[in-house]
Image: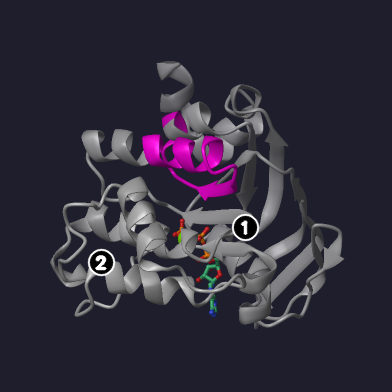
Amino acid sequence: MLKAKNVTKKFGELVAVNNLSFEVKKGQVYGIAGPNGAGKSTVYNLITGNYSYEGKIEFNGQDITGLPPHSIAKAGIARTFQIPEIFPSLTVQKSIRLGSRFGARGGLDLEHTDELIGFVGLKEERFQKTGLLNLLGKKKLMIGAALATKPEILMLDEPMAGSNANEIISMMELIKNINQELGITIIIIEHFMKVLTELTETLLIIESGTRICCDKPEIVTSDPRVIESYLGDAYAESK
Ligand SMILES: Nc1ncnc2c1ncn2[C@@H]1O[C@H](COP(=O)(O)OP(=O)(O)OP(=O)(O)O)[C@@H](O)[C@H]1O
Ligand SMILES: [Mg+2]
């Protein structure tokens, strides 16, 4: 469904993404992990057309390299950001309806907006200003706004960051529902290995922009290269 072929991104001297290739299949939950500064968020920024790059990215067999962000959103790729980006003075309901206009497939009417708000778990808060939501609420809102574009693929950037144990469970539940009930393919960048092991079918580890390995999570987390470069000995001993 989404194929990156020999993708390289340089910021001046820095090679943020280095000759990276990977393939996400339809229906998958696909994980990306790696140390801070590994180039994970940059990979999203390349897929969504925010920067130019060397190499090629295909979506549903179509070359999307060099397309502007709005065309990529229209093609069916949506994302969330590491730090929630919201309009604080709008209500939850208005924000989701605004989000729906960025997609391809026409804005959402009120009924479908409220259905989606219920799906992400913000029904009680739908007339609240988004600036008053807690962190988990803001993240759910950001996911709701991304879903409002009716994407085929949703890319999440560290959705668990800053969350407590209960919030992590709630977010994992939502991600599973998006994948299984809405049939949306998911790419998730995350630092919590337990979350990735439970949610994903395939896990890509990158370091300094380079692919270290890519396989089923249980294989990846026992790979000596991954333990050495990313997980550390403490993780290996705790298994
Ligand atoms: N717009 C930019 N201009 C210059 N350098 C950048 C830019 N965006 C990212 N970088 C650099 O590229 C490298 C990869 O950054 P990126 O944000 O993709 O890492 P990451 O894997 O998402 O890290 P983290 O886990 O901390 O979120 C870093 O060294 C970062 O400083
Ligand atoms: Mg990042």
Q: Amino acid at mark 1?
A: Ser
| Beta carbon of the mark 2 residue lies under 8 A of ligand 2 | no
Q: Which disc is residue 208 wearing?
A: 1
Looking at the figure, which quarter contains the C terminus? top left
Tag 1's secondary structure? loop
Q: Quadrant of residue 114?
A: bottom left
Expressed as whole percent of the image width and height from the top left, the position of residue 46 reads: 66, 70
Q: Is residue 34 above or below residue 228?
A: below
Answer yes or no: is residue 87 visible.
yes
On the picture, is 13 further left or further right than 140? right
> Is 132 in front, or is 203?
132
Q: Are marks 2 and 1 in contact (CB under 8 Å)?
A: no
Expressed as whole percent of the image width and height from the top left, the position of residue 19 reads: 79, 61
Q: Which disc is residue 200 wearing?
A: none
Residue holding disc 2: 92
The residue positioned 65% from the left and 73% from the top of the image is 74
Does label 2 or label 1 sit earlier along the sequence?
A: 2
| Residue 170 forms part of the magenta stretch | no
The residue positioned 43% from the left and 29% from the top of the image is 194
The mark closer to the camera, 2 or 1, is 2
| Residue 184 forms part of the magenta stretch | yes
Expressed as whole percent of the image width and height from the top left, the position of residue 5 reads: 83, 59
On the picture, is 59 further left or further right than 108? right
Q: Is residue 218 above or below residue 72?
A: above
Q: Quadrant of residue 93?
A: bottom left
Q: Amino acid at mark 2?
A: Val
The residue positioned 40% from the left and 18% from the top of the image is 238
The residue positioned 58% from the left and 61% from the top of the image is 39
Magenta-highlighted residues:
172-194
